[in-house]
Image: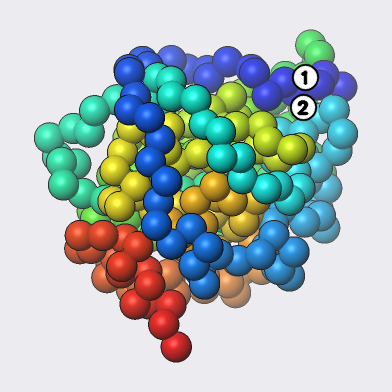
């Protein structure tokens, strides 16, 4: 099968045009207690019981759960996001992961799949079976009411873009960022929030993989990995926390208060 390159195109013309971005600012509290260590059980990508289409060497559609150490050297470049719309002015920007956070996907047939997405690999079309996490529709609807929502996945656009088309039919996500927008650092695809072009004091990331936010653990709301438990209520559990955070003037201060014993 084709080696699904981390430099594959965005697909669908959904990537915003680049704009000059200010040099990254180191956020306070980067080592705060919310940062879940990459070795913590139940976090990271893990192995899927249903044959994860992103889990095999050379066929990965997502990111490996490899630990990484943040680099202090960050080179300013174009911002990944355009200016916020008038509707989103003053809102917190929340970066939301896709796989094992909102959905679970597999090359192996799933009888109760919500979507079946064709993905072309080396000229052959393969079917990817996608399960929606319980309460994901309600979760996304509420997120769109409260935040500027951005999908940021380490998966490739050829897979993630059509899945998001089916998942986000309300248009909650203002932008979609894929693997080529990640920083490949010591074997891991990291989502560098300083490249978004948003104030880090007004930015959150929701992700099941601590390796994805290892540069910015102080901005993270960790999410339990999900594969196929239809009794899962993680997204409902997160809603009141995120509703409280939506009014924060400084996410570091607000997250610090929530983490306090």
Q: Nearer the viewer, residue 196 or 128?
A: 196
- Asked whether 149 or 168 is in front, the reply is 149
- The image shows residue 217 at horizontal and vertical percentages of 51, 57
The label on residue 111 is none
Q: Which residue is mark 1?
A: 121
Separation of marks 1 and 2 at Cα, in angstroms = 7 Å
Residue farthest along the bottom direction in this orientation: 261
Q: Residue at x 28, y 51 (%)?
A: 202
In the picture, measured across the screen, residue 166 lies left or right of residue 229, that is left
Closer to the camera in the image, 117 or 34: 34
The residue at which mark 2 appears reads as 126
Q: Position of residue 232 (x, y in %)?
A: 58, 72
Residue shown at 87% from the left, 22% from the top? 1
Residue at the image position 87 percent from the left and 34 percent from the top: 57
Disc 1 + disc 2, Cβ < 8 Å: yes
On screen, residue 260 above or below 58: below
Which of these two is toward me, 106 or 46?
A: 46
**N-terminal-most mark, 1 or 2:** 1
Residue 232 versus residue 189 in the image, above or below? below
| Residue that extends furthest to the front in the rendered view of this protein | 72
Report the side of 40 relative to 207 (left or right): right
On the image, the x and y values in percent for residue 148 come to 28, 44
Residue visible at 38% across and 41% down? 25
Q: Position of residue 241 (x, y in %)?
A: 36, 72
Q: Residue 199 appears in which quarter of the rendering?
A: top left
> In which quadrant is the C terminus drawn?
bottom left
């Amino acid at each position: 099968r084709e080696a699904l390159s981390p430099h594959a195109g965005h697909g669908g013309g959904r990537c915003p045009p680049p704009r000059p971005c200010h040099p990254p600012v180191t956020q306070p509290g980067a080592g705060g207690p919310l940062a879940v260590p990459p070795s913590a059980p139940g976090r990271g990508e893990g192995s899927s019981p249903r044959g994860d289409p992103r889990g095999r060497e050379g066929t990965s559609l997502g990111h490996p759960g490899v630990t990484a150490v943040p680099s202090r050297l960050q080179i300013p470049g174009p911002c990944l996001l355009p200016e916020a719309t008038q509707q989103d002015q003053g809102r917190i920007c929340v970066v939301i992961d896709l796989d094992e956070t909102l959905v679970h996907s597999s090359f192996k047939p799933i009888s109760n799949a919500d979507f079946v997405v064709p993905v072309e690999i080396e000229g052959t079309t393969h079917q990817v079976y996608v399960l929606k996490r319980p309460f994901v529709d309600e979760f996304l609807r509420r997120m769109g009411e409260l935040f500027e929502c951005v999908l940021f996945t380490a998966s490739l656009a050829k897979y993630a873009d059509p899945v998001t088309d089916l998942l986000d039919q309300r248009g909650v996500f203002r932008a979609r960022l894929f693997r080529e927008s990640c920083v490949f650092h010591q074997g891991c695809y990291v989502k560098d929030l300083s490249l978004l072009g948003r104030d880090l004091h007004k930015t959150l990331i929701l992700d099941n993989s601590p390796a994805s936010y290892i540069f910015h653990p102080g901005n993270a709301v960790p999410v339990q990995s999900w594969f196929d438990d239809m009794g899962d209520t993680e997204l409902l559990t997160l809603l009141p926390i995120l509703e409280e955070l939506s009014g924060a003037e400084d996410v570091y201060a607000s997250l610090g208060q929530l983490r306090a014993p």
